[in-house]
Image: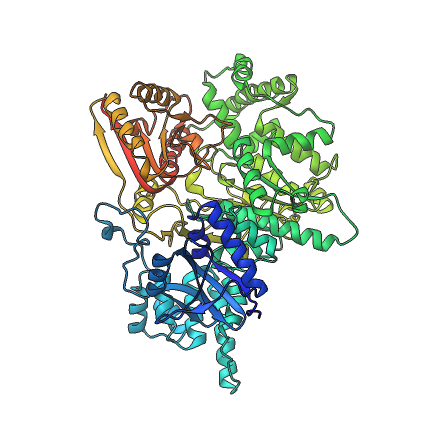
């Protein structure tokens, strides 16, 4: 006698629950899943009394899987020990709103985390996130047939699950449209179009078929919360532990960005924790799949480039990419992960040009400043080169004399410009003498090599993460790498219309992901002045912070409040408007200490509380960090200090790093040690704009550091 066979689908919650099982239990779960799929009678799927779920067992330890069933479709919702699994089934239900399927709590909750998460202390109610429909105006609500009074009620619904529970009772088309609006507010036009089309069908008397549960589970609208593995191997790998939730679950807003088709460049912005890096990885996979499909049997050696501003982050991207596509996937051969420095060197090598990265630029400036006739320090010349020459692409004497110096402080007359140019030209000559250039020079020369046809871009499309830390020369190189060769050469011809450069970028040729408030290295420039045009459907903003609690998010945003609005281009409005976290949490714990030794004692106490998860300690300077590491060692606390090329491990209970090294890191708990050192004192030597940029970067550093925390953030400040 055989049992019924099933098509399986998995919710995000189920995959998170199975991560808590032992490896042996996950292996048993995979075996049971395979038997259920094959209709093996040794695993019996049966109804549960009093709740709308079905269940089956996985081993002799009485672990149970809770599912929703419709015909031969089985949606895996939860897994756990017998009693706790049944208790979960009593507290949850599946809500279907049109074609959208959500798992929701059946009891009234105040946006709290699940009961099995660590209990929080403090008044978390003060930091409840705004509801998903809070920012929606009455005018938009009216477009979906919702009056002002109902709109006021909907704005107060605290989170997406509660909203799904409520909208389940709305007319199907309206409920789905409102829930889509909550999930992806930036897609308003498309949502309105689909809703109006449904109304038009209804007005013509056409029946609007209600999707069955099985049809809804299979609808692509649920890809952010339901995973349907393509084969048995895929779900066995996932259930046996080769799994990270971000690999297969994308929030609908992220999914649409990943799959969007553009005529040229795509800009993706969002605050920390919104998944910009995840989007970059998935977009690389999707574009590689598209490229393979379009290439057919003809074959091509063009690849997809996934890049960022330094080698450490590039290594992290490469490891994440392997997790995403699988280490044996043929897609890995189609996606290249490199820092932009390495890419520039590769282009220059192919063109037969000098490509050595000169790292000791201090000596180069000393040689160049031997020509200094106006008594300016090195910092002035460094920023003049980046903020004027690089920004205006003014790398000749004549071009520099015409280049604008807006915001650079004291005006330079023609005589002074000539003196400054002598030093800047001498610096470039010294770089050339040493066989290459610094990053600005390498990117500039690589762009020229592509524009001249000395070599061509080896990439079909380019995806850049952390683009806010790319300067003008780097952005121009990114654009050239993602451009059509003939169009790029035409745009680079003398006297060519600057708009030609913007139009040279291939369809889907350039994706830029970043957050202007996290810029800690480079001078702010706009994409447009670097020959990159985005707008309309080619500019997307991610709003949901999945990492940090609402309380920590608010405290971090307050650090950068008042800075110039920065959406990486010429956009208007606050780029952080609508940015919110999904969990409440408690405000950062701020402590003042009489001495650094007293602060070290506090950090040691936090480190010994290992039950609360890994602790990441960040400080502004290497000197302060080294002293803290020594003080912790004296107290018997071992810590691993992350250097530039080190990779963190989840098994490290205590990690130390500088705030600059914090990019790409996250931990359940974060301590900002030595808060009194942020902002670090400006060293002088530049002009008014240099000082303002320094202070802006210092505030951005603290913003970056605080948003590495998932659950708890501590801030220590020593008076002596």
Q: Closer to the camera, 664 or 513?
A: 664
Q: Is residue 656 above or below residue 562?
A: above
Q: Closer to the camera, 188 or 331?
A: 331
- Picture residue at 31% right of the left edge, 54% below the top: 129
Of the 4 image quadrants, the one containing the N terminus is bottom right
- Picture residue at 36% right of the left edge, 38% below the top: 703
Give the percent coordinates (x, y) of residue 563.
36, 41
Q: Is residue 293 above or below residue 647?
A: below
Q: Closer to the camera, 199 or 568?
A: 199
The answer to whether residue 210 is seen in the rendering is: yes
The answer to whether residue 471 is seen in the rendering is: no
- Picture residue at 54% right of the left edge, 63% below the top: 36
Colouring scheme applied when the structure was drawn: rainbow
Give the percent coordinates (x, y) of residue 578.
37, 54
Q: To which quarter of the image does residue 687 belong?
A: top left
Give the percent coordinates (x, y) of residue 392.
56, 35
**Residue occupying the far right of the picture:** 298
Of the 4 image quadrants, the one containing the C terminus is top left
Number of numbered labels in the structure image:
0
Give the percent coordinates (x, y) of residue 178.
41, 68
Q: Is residue 254 above or below residue 143?
A: above
Q: To which quarter of the image does residue 685 belong?
A: top left
Q: To which quarter of the image does residue 57 belong?
A: bottom left
């Amino acid at each position: 006698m055989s049992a019924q066979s099933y098509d399986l689908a998995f919710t995000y919650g189920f995959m998170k629950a199975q991560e808590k099982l032992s490896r042996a239990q996950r292996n048993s779960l995979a075996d049971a899943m395979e038997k259920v799929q094959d209709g093996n009678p040794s695993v019996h799927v049966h109804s549960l009394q009093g709740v709308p779920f079905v269940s089956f067992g996985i081993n002799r330890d009485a672990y149970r899987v809770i599912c929703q069933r419709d015909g031969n479709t089985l949606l895996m919702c939860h897994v756990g020990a017998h009693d706790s699994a049944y208790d979960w089934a009593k507290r949850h239900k599946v809500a279907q709103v049109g074609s959208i399927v959500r798992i929701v709590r059946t009891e009234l909750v105040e946006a709290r985390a699940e009961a099995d998460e660590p209990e929080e202390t403090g008044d978390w109610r003060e930091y409840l996130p705004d509801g998903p429909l809070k920012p929606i105006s009455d005018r938009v609500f009216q477009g979906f047939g919702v009056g002002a009074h109902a709109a006021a009620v909907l704005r107060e619904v605290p989170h997406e699950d509660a909203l799904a529970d409520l909208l389940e009772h709305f007319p199907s088309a309206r409920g789905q449209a409102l829930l889509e609006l909550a999930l992806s507010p930036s897609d308003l036009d498309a949502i309105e179009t689909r809703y109006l089309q449904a109304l038009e069908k209804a007005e013509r008397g056409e029946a609007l078929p209600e999707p069955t549960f099985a049809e809804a589970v299979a609808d692509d609208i649920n890809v952010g919360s339901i995973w349907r593995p393509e084969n048995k191997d895929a779900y066995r790998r996932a259930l046996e532990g080769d799994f990270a939730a971000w690999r297969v679950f994308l929030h609908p807003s992220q999914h649409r960005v990943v799959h969007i088709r553009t005529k040229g460049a795509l800009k993706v912005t969002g605050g920390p924790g919104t998944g910009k890096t995840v989007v970059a990885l998935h977009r690389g996979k999707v574009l590689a799949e598209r490229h393979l499909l379009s290439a057919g049997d003809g074959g091509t050696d063009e690849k997809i480039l996934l890049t960022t501003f330094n080698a450490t982050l590039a290594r992290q991207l490469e490891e994440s990419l392997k997790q995403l596509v699988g280490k044996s996937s043929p897609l890995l051969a189609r996606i290249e992960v490199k820092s932009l420095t390495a890419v520039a060197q590769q282009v220059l090598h192919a063109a037969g040009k000098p490509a050595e990265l000169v790292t000791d630029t201090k000596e180069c400036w000393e040689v160049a400043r031997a020509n200094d006739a106006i008594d300016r320090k090195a910092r002035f010349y460094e920023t003049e080169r980046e903020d004027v020459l690089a920004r205006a692409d003014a790398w000749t004497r004549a071009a520099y004399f015409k280049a604008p110096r807006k915001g650079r402080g004291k005006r330079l007359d023609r005589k002074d410009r000539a003196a400054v140019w002598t030093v800047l030209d001498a610096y470039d000559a010294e770089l050339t003498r040493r066989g290459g250039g610094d990053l600005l020079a390498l990117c500039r020369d690589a762009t020229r090599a592509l524009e001249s046809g000395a070599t061509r871009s080896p990439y079909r499309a380019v995806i850049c993460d952390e683009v806010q830390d790319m300067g003008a020369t780097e952005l121009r190189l990114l654009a050239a790498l993602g451009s059509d060769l003939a169009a790029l050469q035409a745009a680079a011809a003398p006297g060519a219309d600057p708009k030609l450069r913007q139009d040279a970028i291939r369809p889907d040729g350039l994706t830029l992901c970043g957050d202007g408030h996290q810029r800690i290295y480079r001078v702010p420039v706009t994409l447009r002045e670097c020959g990159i045009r985005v707008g309309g459907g080619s500019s997307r903003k991610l709003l949901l912070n999945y990492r940090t609690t609402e309380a920590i998010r608010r405290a971090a945003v307050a650090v950068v409040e008042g800075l110039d609005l920065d959406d990486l281009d010429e956009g208007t409005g606050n780029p952080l408007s609508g940015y919110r976290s999904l969990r409440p949490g408690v405000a950062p714990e701020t402590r003042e200490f009489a001495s650094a030794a007293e602060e070290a004692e506090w950090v040691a106490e936090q480190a010994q509380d290992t039950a609360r998860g890994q602790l990441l300690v960040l400080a502004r300077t290497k000197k302060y960090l080294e002293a803290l590491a020594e003080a912790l060692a004296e107290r018997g606390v071992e810590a691993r200090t992350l250097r530039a090329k080190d990779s963190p491990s989840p098994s490290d209970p205590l990690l130390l790093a500088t705030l600059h090294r914090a990019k790409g890191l996250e931990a359940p708990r974060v301590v900002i040690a030595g808060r009194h050192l942020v902002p670090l004192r400006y060293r002088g030597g530049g002009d008014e704009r240099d000082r303002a940029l320094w202070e802006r970067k210092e505030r951005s550093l603290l913003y970056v550091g605080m948003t590495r925390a998932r659950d708890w953030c501590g801030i220590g400040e020593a008076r002596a």
